[in-house]
């Protein structure tokens, strides 16, 4: 398979070359997987259950070590889980966004400024004192994204962030990420099962059995999948 390549003038924020990964004592999950995500663009990762999407994202985030292959990530990574309750740990919105800044040895004023900027970026500045338990699912996901922005992450990895949300909130969140990519120059890689979410991205990859088998324009990939009625996303 040809290596996915970006435009000659476009720097890749994420580069994966011949990546392989297997669970201990189990079957191979990723097999010679290669892809490139252009800097400052919003790309999505598609594939059936078991194709390796979530595992690939965890490898990119450094949460798992690869068996072999190369990973190059240019910039600080922020990871957004499918279930926001797995990563929101503080009692209030402001405290949770500030939590990731503890190790940066910032002044209180600097932390407060970072928190305000991040919450404003996801349109939740007025909820700074709101208890986490009082948030909706969509608001929790936006707080998780705000935490990454506060840490000045340049790359967002999002693992099916709309899986637990209602249809209207799903589209609101994907549109929010699209705006953040365009307005802040972020790079985002988003795992999804929902073809309608492809309307918001710059490009997409299709994974099958641990390999990228197609990539490019979202509409072309959407059409390809719609023409395969036996494929369950």
Image (cartoon, rainbow, N blue to C red):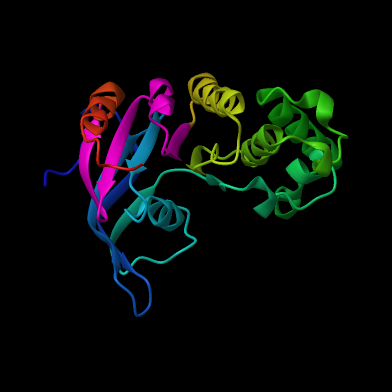
Figure quadrant of the C terminus: top left
Q: Position of residue 6 (x, y in %)?
A: 24, 32
* Magenta segment: 187-216
Residue furthest front in the image: 230
Instruction: Give left or right: position of 96 versus 6.
Output: right
Residue at the spot 83% in from the left edge and 38% down from the top edge: 134
Q: Position of residue 139 (x, y in %)?
A: 70, 33
Work out whether residue 87 can be spotted.
no
Residue furthest bottom in the image: 25
Above or below: residue 72 compared with residue 8: below
Asked whether 54 or 59 is in front, the reply is 54
Residue 211 forms part of the magenta stretch: yes
Residue at the spot 73% in from the left edge and 29% down from the top edge: 119
Work out whether residue 214 can be spotted.
yes
Residue 224 forms part of the magenta stretch: no
Above or below: residue 152 compared with residue 199: below
Q: Position of residue 10 (x, y in %)?
A: 29, 28
Residue furthest left in the image: 1
Asked whether 156 or 233 is in front, the reply is 233
Residue at the spot 43% in from the left edge and 39% down from the top edge: 192
Asked whether 7 or 29 is in front, the reply is 29
Q: Position of residue 197 (x, y in %)?
A: 43, 27
């Amino acid at each position: 398979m040809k290596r996915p390549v970006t435009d000659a003038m476009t720097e890749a924020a994420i580069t994966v070359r011949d990546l392989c990964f297997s669970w201990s004592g189990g079957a191979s999950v990723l097999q010679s997987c290669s892809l490139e995500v252009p800097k400052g663009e919003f790309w999505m990762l598609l594939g059936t259950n078991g194709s390796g999407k979530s595992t690939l994202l965890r490898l990119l985030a450094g949460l798992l070590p690869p068996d072999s292959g190369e990973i190059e990530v240019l910039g600080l990574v922020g990871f957004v889980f499918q279930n926001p309750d797995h990563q929101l740990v503080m009692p209030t919105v402001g405290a949770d966004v500030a939590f990731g800044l503890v190790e940066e040895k910032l002044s209180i004023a600097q932390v407060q400024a970072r928190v305000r900027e991040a919450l404003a970026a996801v349109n939740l500045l007025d909820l700074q004192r709101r208890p986490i338990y009082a948030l909706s699912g969509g608001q929790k996901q936006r707080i998780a994204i705000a935490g990454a922005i506060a840490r000045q992450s340049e790359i967002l990895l999002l693992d099916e962030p709309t899986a637990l949300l209602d249809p209207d909130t799903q589209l609101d969140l994907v549109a929010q990420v699209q705006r953040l990519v365009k307005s802040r120059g972020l790079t985002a890689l988003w795992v999804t099962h929902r073809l309608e979410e492809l309307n918001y991205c710059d490009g997409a990859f299709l994974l099958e059995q641990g390999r990228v088998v197609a990539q490019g324009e979202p509409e072309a990939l959407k059409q390809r999948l719609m023409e395969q009625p036996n494929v369950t996303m």
